[in-house]
Image (cartoon, rainbow, N blue to C red):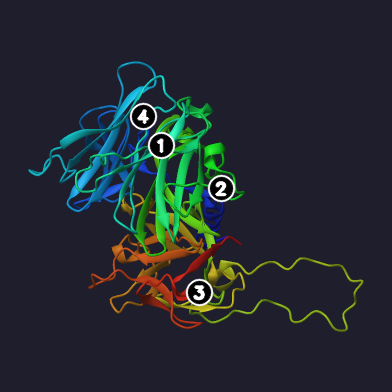
Amino acid sequence: MNFRTKLMGVAALLSVLLVGTAKAQIGKPFIHDPSSVVECDGKYYTFGTGSGGLVSEDGWTWNSGGVRPGGGVAPDIIKIGDRYYVSYARGARKQHASDVLVMWTKTLDPKSPDFGYKDETLVASSNGDDDCEAIDPAFLLDPTDGRLWLTYGTYFGYIRLVELDPKTGKRVAGNKELNIAIDCEATALMYRDGWYYLLGTHGTCCDGANSTYNIVVGRSKKVTGPYLDNMGRDMLEGGGKMVLAAGERVNGPGHFGRTIVDDGVEKMSCHYEADLDQGGRSVLGIRPLLWKNGWPVGGDNFKEGTYEIESERRGYALELVVDFTRMPGGMRAFGRNTDEPVKPVASQQLADVINTWPTGNIDVRIGDYMFRPHQKWTITAVPDAGGYLGGPYYKIVIAGTDRALAATADAEVITVPSFTGAPEQLWRIDQQTDGTYRIMPKVVPNSKEKLALVSSGDSTPTLGKFDMKSDNSKWNFKAH
C-alpha cells in the first residue's frame, strides 16, 4: 500500500467517524434565562438572569459583554423604531412577590455615546399571595396592527398577557391582564401566517443535568387566545405540543426566542440547563426553527460527515465533472446459473478512479447518484474561520481528498486541488423552515452580493439569488 493510498484510507476512516458530530456555540456561551437574540450595530446580543449578557461578532462565538442595569431575572428585549426595549423581573419582598419592569436604550453598545437605559417603569406585579408570579416577561410586537404585548408568569399560577404602548414601553392605561396558560413558565409569543403562537417552558429547572425543561406550544387566531395544541387542548388546561426536548448531551431547553434571518431561514434561541460537554453548565443554544403542518419544531444543527449533496429540484447529486469509470462486470440476469455462489460486489473506491481525474481545477455538475467517489463530499467545520448565527463555516471536500468546493469570481462553482482556507472556500449551511438546506459561500470573489448554491437546470449548479419559493435553491444532505 503506497503513502497516497494510506492517506486516502485514513481520511475515509475519519470521515466515517465524523458523521453525527454537531457543533455547539463556542467561546463562553454561559447564560441562564436568555432573552431573544437581537442585532445592534453589526453585533448580536442576548441578556440573562443577573446584570449582564452575551455578545457576539458573528452569532457563533459568544462571550460576556452585554450590559443591563437592574439585575433581576429572565429579561427579554425587542427593537421598536430606534429604541431597544428591555423587560425584566425583580423581586425582593417575599417568595413569588415580584415586579416586571420595562426600560429602553437607543443602543446596546456600552461604548456608544447613545448608550443608557431610560424611563424604567412598572408594568406588572405580584404580591406573593395571588395566582400569578410576575417574572419571565417576553414581548410581541404584533405585525398585523403594531400593538405591543407582554406575557409573564411561572408555574406558580397563571401565565398572563398585558398590553404595552409601543411608543413608550409603558402599560396601556386601563388594560386588564388576561390569563392565557398554566403549567409552564418562560413564555414567548410569535405570529406567523394568521396564527399567534404561545411557547411555554414546561418541566423542572435549576437542577443541572437533572432538569427536565422542554419547550411546548399552542396557537390561536387571536392574540388573547385561547391557545390550543395540536390535539385541541387549551394551554389554560395544561396543553402544549412539543417543540424541543433534551438530546445530544444537552438537557433542559427553555426560554424560547425567534430570529428571522431571511425568508425561509429562521433560528430559535434558548438555554440548555446543562451541556454535558461543557461541564454541565447552562449555555446558550441556537438552532434552526422549522415549520411542519403549521407548527414550529426545533430543527437540528448541521452535523459534520460525508454526504451525498442532493438537489431538491429533481433529486440529482452534486458531483465532479470527470469521466464515468465503469465497475467490473456486466448485467448478471438472463441465462445465469442461479445455483452459483452469491458473492458481494465491492463498491468503487477512490483509489480505483482518482488517477483518472485531472490534477488542476475540476468543474462540478449535477447527475444521477451512484454512490461513486466523485459524488461523496466530506463536510467539516473550519476552526478559527468564524461563523454566522448558530453555525460555523465549513469546508466541503471530495471524501478522502483535500479537493475543495469553491466559489469563483464569475459566480460559478468549481473544485480546487487543495483547501487553503480562502473565504471563497468556506461555506455557510442553514437548515430552512421546510427542513431542506441553503448552502452559501462566505465570499464570492470581487462581489458584495450574497449568493447561494442553486440548481440552474437539472445538471448545472451555479451561484444565484436565494429564493425560498424555488426548489432550485434547496439542497439535502444524505449519508450513504
Answer above or below: position of 297 versus 234.
below
Identity of the residue drawn at 55% across and 60% down? 293
Q: Are marks 2 and 4 in contact (CB under 8 Å)?
A: no
Q: Residue placed farthest to the top in the image?
A: 94
SS at circle 3: strand
In the drawing, what numbered circle is on residue 60? none
Dot 4 or dot 1, earlier in sequence = 4
Residue that carries the numbered disc 2 in the rendered image: 229
In three-dimensional space, the C-alpha distance between marks 2 and 1, rounded to whole angstroms, equals 18 Å
Q: Is residue 81 visible?
A: yes
Dot 3 or dot 1, earlier in sequence = 1
| Res 462 quadrant in image | bottom left
Q: Nearer the viewer, mark 3 or mark 2?
A: 2
Q: Amino acid at mark 2?
A: Asp
Dot 2 or dot 1, earlier in sequence = 1
| Res 404 quadrant in image | bottom left
Q: Position of residue 294 (x, y in %)?
A: 52, 58
Q: Nearer the viewer, mark 3 or mark 1?
A: 1
Q: Is residue 132 left or right of residue 10?
A: left
Residue that carries the numbered disc 1 in the rendered image: 160
In three-dimensional space, the C-alpha distance between marks 4 and 1, rounded to whole angstroms, equals 9 Å
| Res 261 quadrant in image | bottom left
Q: Nearer the viewer, mark 2 or mark 1?
A: 1
Q: Position of residue 138 (x, y in %)?
A: 35, 41
Q: Amino acid at mark 4?
A: Ala
Residue that carries the numbered disc 3 in the rendered image: 319
Identity of the residue drawn at 56% across and 41% down? 239
SS at circle 4: loop
